[in-house]
Image (spheres, helix red, strand yellow):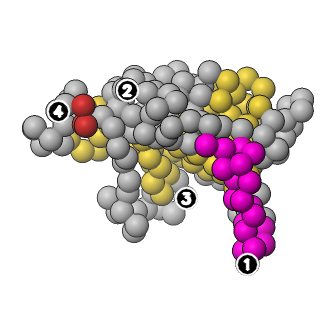
Amino acid sequence: YGVHIDWSDPSNPVVTCDGPVSQLEGTAVVSDPVTGAALIISDGNNAYDGNHTPIPGATGLGGGPSSSQSAVISPVPGDPNQYWLFAVTESGGPVYAHRLDVSVPDGASNVSLVESLAAFTNSADERATIMRHSNGIDYWLLYSNRTNGNVYSRLISGTTIGAEQVAYTLPSGTHDGWAAFVGYLIGSPDHSK
């Protein structure tokens, strides 16, 4: 609920309750890899820069306030200033992709919205995740669909989001009912599955 932890001094973290988002579930943050300062903050529906200023055009992104993973963020491979923000609909529905740039200010915000893609409509759950590709450069976006038991993947390579592919199909009977579309998708620590 808007809690912010400043880790700029790891021996003395400072906790404040001044964050720009307040919701039940699913938020995402990207921090500067050197300073730890927040760069992008999102609840899946809106995105803010590290100063909590709304990013122009980054409203109504498609994420749900009670979606388990309403927003997941991936670096854009090959560009340290750009990120893909994936917004996940509440109670099942599409995944929306938005590319943001932290090096190009837009008005009062330190971040600009570069592009938004058409919805990935095969998702029917509240979850998505990002996993590093085995090549150590690219990433995978994974999301699922409880109606058919498929886990879908899309390759994130530079500014391109690849075609949808079925990465895995859950066994029959394991993807039925309400609990089948909530929760989280996570990858293994070694990024192999």
Residue at the disc numbered 3:
137
Going from N to C along the chain, the mark reached first, 3 or 4, is 3
Q: Mark 2 or 3, which is nearer the eye? A: 2
Magenta: main secondary structure: loop
Amino acid of disc 1 = Ser
Amino acid of disc 3 = Ile
Residue at the disc numbered 2:
91
Question: 130 or 27: nearer the eye?
Answer: 27
Q: CA distance from mark 3 to mark 4?
A: 35 Å
Residue 101 x/y as whole percent: 75, 40
In the picture as drawn, the residue positioned furthest to the left comes out as 172
Question: 35 or 52: nearer the eye?
Answer: 52
Amino acid of disc 2 = Ser
Q: Image point 46% across, 27% down: which residue?
A: 89
Residue 57 x/y as whole percent: 73, 23
Q: CA distance from mark 4 to mark 1?
A: 47 Å
Q: Mark 4 or 1, which is nearer the eye? A: 1
Compared to residue 59, the image places residue 161 above or below, namely below
Residue at the disc numbered 1:
11
**Residue 165 shows up from this direction:** no
Tell me the crowding category of disc 4: few under 14, some 14 to 19, or many 20 or more residues within 10 angstroms, Cα based.
Answer: few
Question: 185 or 6: nearer the eye?
Answer: 6
Q: Image point 20% across, 41% down: which residue?
A: 169
Residue at the disc numbered 4:
176
**Left or right: 83, with 96 as reference point:** right
Going from N to C along the chain, the mark reached first, 1 or 2, is 1
Query: What is the span of residues highlighted in magenta in the rendered image?
Result: 1-19
Q: Mark 3 or 1, which is nearer the eye? A: 1
